[in-house]
Amino acid sequence: MIMVCHEFCLETDRQIMRQRRKLLIALGACTLAPLRPFAQQPPPKAPRIGILSPFNSSSDAFRDAVQQRLQELGYTEGRSIVIEYRASNDMADRLPQLAADLVNLKVDAIVTTTAAGVQATKQATATIPIIMAGVDDAVDQGFVTSLAKPGGNITGTSWLNTELSAKRVELLKQMLPKISRVALLREAVGAASSLQATEAAARRLGLRLVVMEIRAPSEIDGVFSALAQERVGALMIAQGPMLADQERHVIELATKQRLPTIFSFRKAVEAGGLMSYGPKPIDLYRRAADYVDRILKGALPGALPVEQPTNFELVINLKTAGALGVDVPHAIALSADEVIR
């Protein structure tokens, strides 16, 4: 009996050891199992954003403002976001191909500016979100259904250039009350509604409007030769990407002909133009980056209302006025947001 009990006890011990060994192996497998798939998970994919610029890549304030604002929002280029930048270098006919390139890269959103940039991107995709960074008359140009409910895949910032164009005519008349003929220099791709508003404002003020349209920078010199024959008293510049890049050249030619000028943005006045009236483009470019952030976090572009700038600035260059022999009326000088001396 004692021998049987001893053998039974030994067998029982062996069974207990085998069970313990199986339990330890099972626990080890449970502990290691989660580590294997975790180690195999790839790093999260950074969103890819396209910037389609109609400007010159060597000095692109549009690109720089969007990138800076994205950094302020916490995005690190190359790590938490990838930016695909394409610039047409003031050649509007290149925009459709550049937009198609970005679409082929399957970017998550495209930021662009000017009517030409938005139109090219709209033609390239109906699904990828498009953010407008300061475009005139987005509803009139058919980019969105309405400002409150854009619908589709386009949103961003836009202003009513019809109102601004009329205001610029009024400012010219206030600055130069004796003028009777005014020229408008614009790009051929500009919105028809802003041209109509300018014509209506000129008629209302008793001014004859001479419209000069260009399709390439090489046409600018010829335009000024024609203006010399028209004997206009002032020049309005409706700035698109081409004229923005040729800004200094336009100012030089206008100065030679002693033509007072009004531009859309203050940068031209700092370069020697007489005055400007319009929104601050850098603010609109930066705001586009805010739209990118919201879309990357799940917002639908068609549900994000199009915003309009609320702050417009009048800037006057007194040095230019003196060189042109223009006496700036006291009332208009007081209403200016900034006077450059």
Image (cartoon, rainbow, N blue to C red):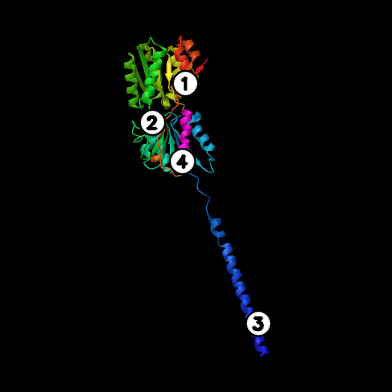
Residue 307 falls in image quadrant: top left
Exactly how many numbered labels are in the figure?
4
Category of crowding for the residue at label 2, using alpha-carbon neighbours closer than 10 angstroms: few (below 14), some (14–19), many (at least 20): many
- 5 sits left or right of 142 in the view: right
Is any part of residue 50 visible from this angle?
Answer: no
| Mark positioned earlier in the residue sequence (4 or 2) | 2
On screen, residue 211 above or below 52:
above
**Residue 289 place in picture, x, y as percent:** 48, 36
Q: Nearer the viewer, residue 71 or 175?
A: 175
In whole angstroms, how far apart are the C-alphas of marks 1 and 4? 33 Å
In whole angstroms, how far apart are the C-alphas of marks 2 and 3? 91 Å
> In the image, which is nearer the foreground, mark 4 or mark 2?
4
Dominant secondary-structure state across the stretch colored magenta: helix
- 149 sits left or right of 320 in the view: left
> In the image, which is nearer the foreground, mark 2 or mark 3?
3
Residue type pointed to by label 1: Ala
Is any part of residue 120 visible from this angle?
Answer: yes
> In the image, which is nearer the foreground, mark 1 or mark 4?
4
Mark 2–mark 3 contact, CB under 8 Å? no
On screen, residue 267 above or below 18:
above
Category of crowding for the residue at label 1, using alpha-carbon neighbours closer than 10 angstroms: few (below 14), some (14–19), many (at least 20): many
The residue where tag 2 is placed is 115
| Mark positioned earlier in the residue sequence (4 or 3) | 3
Q: Secondary structure at mark 3?
A: helix
Category of crowding for the residue at label 4, using alpha-carbon neighbours closer than 10 angstroms: few (below 14), some (14–19), many (at least 20): few
Checking the image for residue 294, the label placed there is 4
The residue where tag 1 is placed is 268
Residue at the spot 49% in from the left edge and 16% down from the top edge: 317
Residue type pointed to by label 2: Ala
The residue where tag 3 is placed is 10
Mark 4–mark 2 contact, CB under 8 Å? no
